[in-house]
Amino acid sequence: MLTAYACEGKSLRRIPDPTDEALHDTAWIDLLGATEDERARVTRAIGLALPTEADISEIETSSRMATRGDALYMSMPLVSRAEADPRSVSAGFVLTPERLVTVRFAPSQTVDRFMERVATGEVATPSSAHIMIGLLEAIVDRQADALEQVRGELDAISQRIFRKEMAAASGRRREDAMLRVTLIGLGRVGNLISYIRETQGTAERIVPFVEQAAEAWLPHDLHGRLETLRVDIGSLNSFNTHLFEKIQFLLDATLGLISIAQNNLMKVLTVASVVGIPPVLVAGVYGMNFKDMPELSWAYGYHYGLALLIISALVPLIWFKVRGWL
């Protein structure tokens, strides 16, 4: 899908069904899952080659940021939630003094919402550089919102793990279910944070790259916004590190609870096996079919045997209780 915008003063106007001539005068061209024909039209209009999906998926810094004349080629991973689980998808940017071209192969709510704000005139975009910086600001803001949501999820998990009722729930089925859900939740949150961290790391490198590579034609009023972006990304990286440490702490606590539950189960099985040994021994002795057994002629021999079985089972239980093992 090809979407084009033209500058009108300090705002953008969307061009419906742009012709090849109209594409030449655009300030922003967005390609989402574009066809070969759409890519060819844009290439003819701007006179520059567009990055392929393989190009924007490279992880080397030299591949993600490059200059060709006045054109800046950049790519960065974005978090996509178009499906049930979040995943990382790469997006490419071609920035020139005249226009910005974004190349996407998967939807991104951040870019779509920025387009909506641009269409309503909420964001001032008098040049291609303003569009690029505004888009970076929208991405960083979205990452901040996502990290705040992650913090709320981690707080909920922490309260679920360390609530007082958990002390009395050891070994119960509901504790096992809770710990299983907790592990899955921590894994999902950890994946999301890793995607966000990757995006932040790339954005942190793109900001100085744009400032240096486009120094000759970058509008002066954008330098302050770039500095603010750098500070915001730094603070988010610190917060991201804090969340990673909290995830590790909660993961250790969850694994510790699982270990305690397993130990309790092994303790029960051990006690049951030890308690059962003396009665089995007594029953084995009196189960022997020897002719001369004095207890066979006793009037209360059967009752004596039952009492001996019960006492042999109770003695280990009492001993474990006295020692504090139960």
Image (cartoon, rainbow, N blue to C red):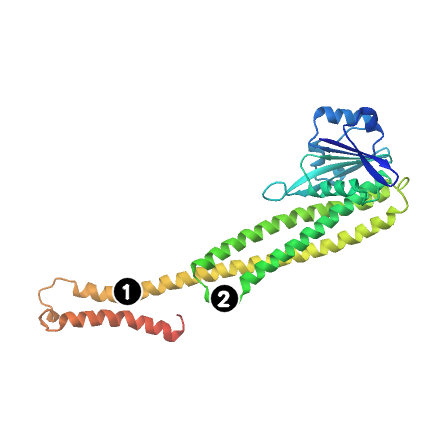
Quadrant occupied by the N terminus: top right
Vertical placement of 307 versus 120: above or below? below
From the viewer's perspective, is 245 left or right of 210?
Answer: left
Q: Which residue is mark 1?
A: 277
Vertical placement of 190 versus 49: above or below? below
| Residue 46 showing in the rendered view | no
Q: Mark 2: which amino acid?
A: Glu
- Kind of element beneath mark 1: helix
Q: Mark 1: which amino acid?
A: Ile
Residue at screen point 61% across, 51% down: 190
Percent coordinates x, y for residue 282 in the rendering: 21, 67
Occupied quadrant, residue 301: bottom left
How far is the residue under mark 2 from the one under mark 1?
35 Å
Residue at screen point 57% across, 53% down: 186
User: Is 75 or 126 nearer to us in this picture?
Assistant: 126
Percent coordinates x, y for residue 20 in the rendering: 81, 24
Q: Residue furthest bottom?
A: 322
Q: Which residue is mark 2?
A: 165
